[in-house]
Image (cartoon, rainbow, N blue to C red):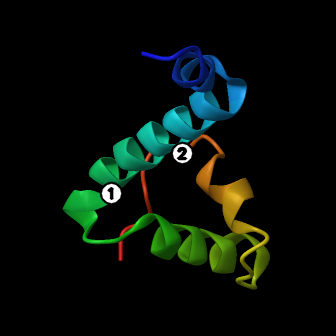
Amino acid sequence: MSSEENNKEESLDYHVHVTGNQMRNNFNEFLKPYNIYTEQFAMLCSLNEYGTSTSSLFPLIIFKPQKTPPHP
Protein backbone atom coordinates (compact mmCIF):
# COMPACT_ATOMS: atom_id res chain seq x y z
CA MET A 1 0.00 0.00 0.00
CA SER A 2 1.41 3.39 -0.93
CA SER A 3 1.84 6.13 1.64
CA GLU A 4 -0.83 8.16 -0.19
CA GLU A 5 -3.40 5.36 0.20
CA ASN A 6 -2.39 4.88 3.83
CA ASN A 7 -2.79 8.61 4.55
CA LYS A 8 -6.21 8.60 2.89
CA GLU A 9 -7.43 5.77 5.16
CA GLU A 10 -6.13 7.57 8.24
CA SER A 11 -7.72 10.92 7.38
CA LEU A 12 -10.60 12.31 9.41
CA ASP A 13 -12.74 12.72 6.28
CA TYR A 14 -12.37 9.01 5.52
CA HIS A 15 -13.40 7.98 9.04
CA VAL A 16 -16.35 10.39 9.10
CA HIS A 17 -17.54 9.03 5.74
CA VAL A 18 -17.22 5.39 6.84
CA THR A 19 -18.89 6.07 10.20
CA GLY A 20 -21.72 7.99 8.52
CA ASN A 21 -22.36 5.12 6.12
CA GLN A 22 -22.40 2.60 8.98
CA MET A 23 -24.87 4.73 10.96
CA ARG A 24 -27.15 5.11 7.95
CA ASN A 25 -27.03 1.38 7.16
CA ASN A 26 -27.77 0.45 10.78
CA PHE A 27 -30.67 2.90 10.96
CA ASN A 28 -32.10 1.57 7.69
CA GLU A 29 -31.92 -1.97 9.11
CA PHE A 30 -33.77 -0.73 12.21
CA LEU A 31 -36.52 0.78 10.03
CA LYS A 32 -36.80 -2.20 7.66
CA PRO A 33 -39.61 -4.00 9.62
CA TYR A 34 -41.69 -0.81 9.32
CA ASN A 35 -41.22 -0.67 5.53
CA ILE A 36 -39.97 2.92 5.60
CA TYR A 37 -36.65 4.50 4.71
CA THR A 38 -34.58 7.10 6.56
CA GLU A 39 -35.88 9.99 4.47
CA GLN A 40 -39.50 8.92 4.96
CA PHE A 41 -38.94 8.60 8.71
CA ALA A 42 -37.41 12.09 8.82
CA MET A 43 -40.32 13.51 6.82
CA LEU A 44 -42.90 11.94 9.14
CA CYS A 45 -41.10 13.19 12.25
CA SER A 46 -40.62 16.64 10.74
CA LEU A 47 -44.33 16.96 10.01
CA ASN A 48 -45.20 15.65 13.46
CA GLU A 49 -42.76 17.85 15.42
CA TYR A 50 -42.60 21.04 13.35
CA GLY A 51 -45.70 20.97 11.16
CA THR A 52 -43.52 21.27 8.08
CA SER A 53 -41.14 19.08 6.14
CA THR A 54 -37.95 20.62 4.82
CA SER A 55 -34.69 18.90 3.96
CA SER A 56 -32.79 21.21 6.34
CA LEU A 57 -34.65 19.63 9.28
CA PHE A 58 -33.87 16.04 8.24
CA PRO A 59 -30.34 15.83 9.73
CA LEU A 60 -31.64 17.15 13.05
CA ILE A 61 -34.28 14.44 13.11
CA ILE A 62 -32.24 11.56 11.71
CA PHE A 63 -29.38 12.02 14.17
CA LYS A 64 -31.60 12.83 17.16
CA PRO A 65 -31.80 9.81 19.51
CA GLN A 66 -34.94 7.83 18.72
CA LYS A 67 -36.38 4.93 20.66
CA THR A 68 -38.94 3.70 18.13
CA PRO A 69 -40.10 4.99 14.77
CA PRO A 70 -43.69 6.18 14.44
CA HIS A 71 -46.18 3.53 13.41
CA PRO A 72 -47.71 4.20 9.99
Q: Residue 7, image x and y in percent? A: 63, 18
Q: Residues within 10 Å of mark 1 (few under 14, many from 20)?
A: some
Q: In the image shown, does 1 or 21 lie closer to the viewer?
A: 1
Q: What numbered label is drawn on residue 66?
A: 2
Q: Residue 46, image x and y in percent? A: 67, 73
Residue at screen point 60% across, 26% down: 8
Residue at screen point 68% across, 66% down: 58
Instruction: Examine the rendered structure and indicate whether residue 17 appears above or below residue 62.
Output: above
Numbered disc 2: secondary structure: loop
Residue at screen point 46% across, 49% down: 24
Q: What numbered label is drawn on residue 31?
A: 1
As drawn, the residue found furthest toward the left would be: 33
Residue 33 shown left or right of residue 10 in the figure: left
Q: In the image shown, does 11 or 47 lie closer to the viewer?
A: 11
Residue 25 shown left or right of residue 15 in the figure: left
Quadrant assignment for the N terminus: top left
